Image (spheres, rainbow, N blue to C red):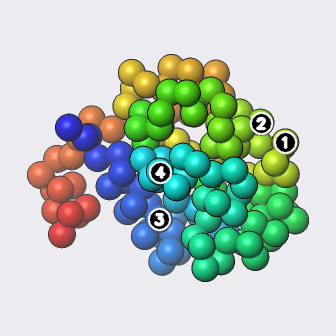
Amino acid sequence: AGAGKSSMVINACREWGVGNIFKEFKRVVLVELRDPNIQAAKTLADILPAEIAKDMEALIRAVGGEATLIIFDGWDEFPAHLRQESLVQRIIENPGSLSLHKSAVMITSRPECSADLHHLASSRIEILGFSEDAVKEYFT
C-alpha cells in the first residue's frame, strides 16, 4: 500500500549517519507516528530514544532546536484527534512554544491526509514509488 515514505526516511537517516546528507544537522530524530508510545507522548523526552532521552531533551532545548531535524513519519497513521491536539501537533505548528524554534521538521504522509499541513510547509515532495534500480538501492 505504501509508496516508500518510511523507507525513504530510514535511508535518509542512514545517509545522515555516515555524513552524506543533512550536513547542517547535528541531530536527526526519527519519530514513527504509528507507535502508540509516541501517540501518548507528553514531553520531548517521550519521543526520543529512552537511553538518551533526558540528556538529549535538555541539549535540544538549550540550543532552541538549532541543528536539529525532527522527522515525523506517518502523519496519515497518526490518529485524527491527535492531529488536532498533541505534543507532535504542537511541535509542528508552534515549535517555539517548546523551545524548538530553530529546529527543522520533516513530515511524511499520504497526500490525502496532509492538506492540513500545507500552510506550514516551506516545500513539499511526492514519492510516486520506486523504479527497479531504486528498489535495489533501498532494499538490498
Q: Under tag 3, what secondary structure?
A: helix
Quadrant location of residue 110?
A: top left
- Per the image, the residue denoted by label 4 is 36
User: In the rendered image, which residue does mark 2 sit on?
Assistant: 94
Number of on-image labels = 4
Which residue is at a point 55% across and 27% down the rendered structure image? Answer: 81
Q: Distance between the Cα atoms at labels 1 and 2?
A: 6 Å
Mark 3 or mark 1: name the one nearer the start of the chain: 3
Per the image, the residue denoted by label 1 is 97
User: In the drawing, does residue 132 fall left or right of residue 95?
Assistant: left
Q: Quadrant of residue 59?
A: bottom right
Residue 22 locus on image (x, y percent) = 57, 61
Q: Secondary structure at mark 1?
A: helix
Residue farthest toward the left in the current orientation of the protein: 132
Depth check, mark 3 against mark 1: the one in front is 1
User: Where 36 sits versus 45, above or below?
Assistant: above
Quarter of the picture holding the C terminus: bottom left
Q: Identify which residue is drawn at 47% across, 65% down.
A: 13
Q: Which residue is mark 3?
A: 13
Give left or right: position of 12 versus 40.
left
- Which of pointers 4 and 3 lies earlier in the amino acid sequence? 3
Residue 58 percent coordinates (x, y): 81, 69
Q: Residues within 10 Å of mark 1 (few under 14, many from 20)?
A: few
Q: CA distance from mark 3 to mark 1?
A: 26 Å
Gap between marks 2 and 4 measured at Cα: 22 Å
Question: Counting residues from the N terminus, which is met first, the one under dot 1 or under dot 4?
Answer: 4
Kindly indicate whether the residue at mark 2 contacts the one at mark 1 (C-beta within 8 angstroms): yes
Q: Nearer the viewer, residue 24 or 8?
A: 8
Q: Quadrant of the N terminus?
A: top left
Dot 3 amino acid type: Cys
Above-or-below relation of 24 to 103: below
**Taking the image as drawn, is residue 125 in sight?**
no
